[in-house]
DNA sequence: ACCTGAACACCGTTCAAGT
DNA sequence: ACCTGAACACCGTTCAAGT
């Protein structure tokens, strides 16, 4: 975990792990079937979000937004973890606890278990995806923003008119903006889903 | 590209590429700075979605949903591509064309360029994320569904009551369900955003 | 039972030498 | 200018041999 945080995912080799732990590579295979199993265990441990709970007086949507932002910040502080996320590594104890928590929230809000599960998954997908797909990027860095602006501006205005025309604005949209717009849209959508369910049930 | 589709991302080595192309590894470095540059070019080419356009009489939300589903299916047919996606590889010509298209849609629907950009990004994030995070999984496979059901059922009911209680339902929720619920929620949220903007502008 | 050293078959990248 | 062969410093994994 220390190795992953300090030197990144690419440095997470069996040799380096063994060295950090003070043993040889070969002995690692005594405790773990292969590297993948080790990664699964590591990712799950890293997903144990700071267990601080949202303010109790908040409604379900505020709680969901609060937890989503907390989860995102946690992942951004541990970029190595985000880069290891695939499909299969999300069934460890900590991931399951997170699932229980979000099901509680969405079922409590009035969704059926099936819809609550799909809503929770798609919210998790959005959070993980937004961190993952912005890994190498820092769009709040003015240097990168300038680079983007020039890239957009220099496109062919006949083929990509909106990119050229709005180059300045587009270059300034940060991953925070993207996250907040997407998060609010998702929660608005879930709210509408709940209202529809209420109407359907009488 | 053929290599990636037939033998997967892990087989995409400089040696294998060279062999497929009928030259030596070293000569690849004549045409490309390093492996990363090659991946960037490859990913962008792979992102050139089947250029079929959505039905013209559809409104912006139907068009967006149509394109989103098309994009997702395209990615799922080329799983190797999805596993290569990071932040930095989405500025090739095809990615930019996709950006132009979605900006057109969202600005046309009434969003400001800034909000349109954030909406388009978050939608893309959701699509890419949902494919990426379901890569190794096939939740419509009855065998995997059974495995999930047993996993949920065998948890501690005191700690994870909802997982245990709704094990059967949860195990049946597919990645299609997740995608549709998330996609509809996002579009509903964007629609609300547009209405708010309309109200604000008079 | 657990650990070690050494090996195996890979990987991306470089570079002097060819044509 | 372009390509080659050979090497370099890595990688995950295995296994006989030690204690």
Image: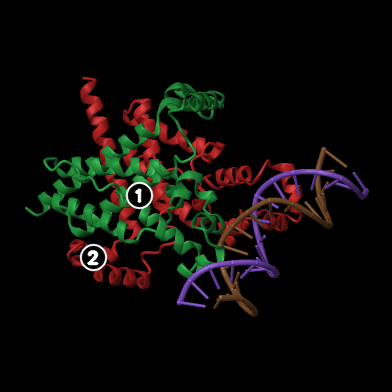
Chain colours: A red, B green, C brown, D purple
Asked where in the image residue B14 lies, by quadrant, the reply is bottom right
Above or below, A195 relative to D19: above
Above or below, C4 relative to A101: below
Q: Residue A87 versus residue A74: which sits nearer the camera? A: A87
Q: x, y percentage for residue B97?
A: 26, 57
Report crowding for label 2: few under 14, some 14 to 19, many 20 or more residues within 10 A (C-alpha): some
Image point 53% across, 23% down: which residue? Answer: B153
- The residue labelled by disc 1 is B125
Image point 46% across, 56% down: which residue? Answer: A76
- Say left or right for B83 vs B154: left
Q: x, y percentage for residue A190?
A: 29, 36
- Say left or right for B180 vs B53: right
Chain bearing tag 2 is: A
Above or below, A196 relative to A1: above
Asked where in the image residue A101 lies, by quadrant, the reply is top left
Mark 2 → mark 1, Cα distance in angstroms: 19 Å
Q: x, y percentage for residue A103?
A: 41, 32
Extreme-top residue of the structure: A202
- The residue labelled by disc 2 is A169
Image point 32% across, 39% down: which residue? Answer: B182
């Amino acid at each position: 975990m220390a190795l992953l945080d300090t030197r990144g995912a690419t440095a997470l080799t069996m040799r380096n792990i063994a060295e950090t732990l003070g043993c040889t590579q070969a002995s690692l295979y005594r405790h773990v079937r292969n590297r993948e199993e080790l990664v699964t265990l590591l990712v799950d441990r890293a997903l144990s979000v700071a267990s601080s709970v949202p303010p109790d007086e908040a409604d379900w949507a505020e709680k969901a937004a609060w937890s989503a932002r907390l989860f995102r910040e946690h992942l951004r502080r541990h970029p190595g973890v985000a880069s290891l996320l695939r499909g299969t590594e999300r069934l460890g104890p900590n991931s399951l606890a997170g699932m229980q928590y979000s099901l509680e929230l969405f079922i409590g809000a009035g969704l059926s278990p099936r819809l609550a599960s799909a809503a929770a998954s798609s919210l998790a997908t959005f959070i993980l995806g937004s961190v993952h797909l912005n890994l190498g990027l820092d769009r709040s860095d003015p240097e990168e923003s300038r680079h983007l602006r020039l890239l957009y501006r220099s496109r062919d205005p006949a083929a990509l008119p909106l990119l050229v025309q709005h180059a300045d604005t587009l270059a300034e949209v940060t991953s925070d903006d993207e996250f907040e717009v997407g998060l609010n849209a998702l929660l608005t959508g879930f709210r509408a889903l709940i209202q529809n369910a209420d109407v359907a049930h009488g």
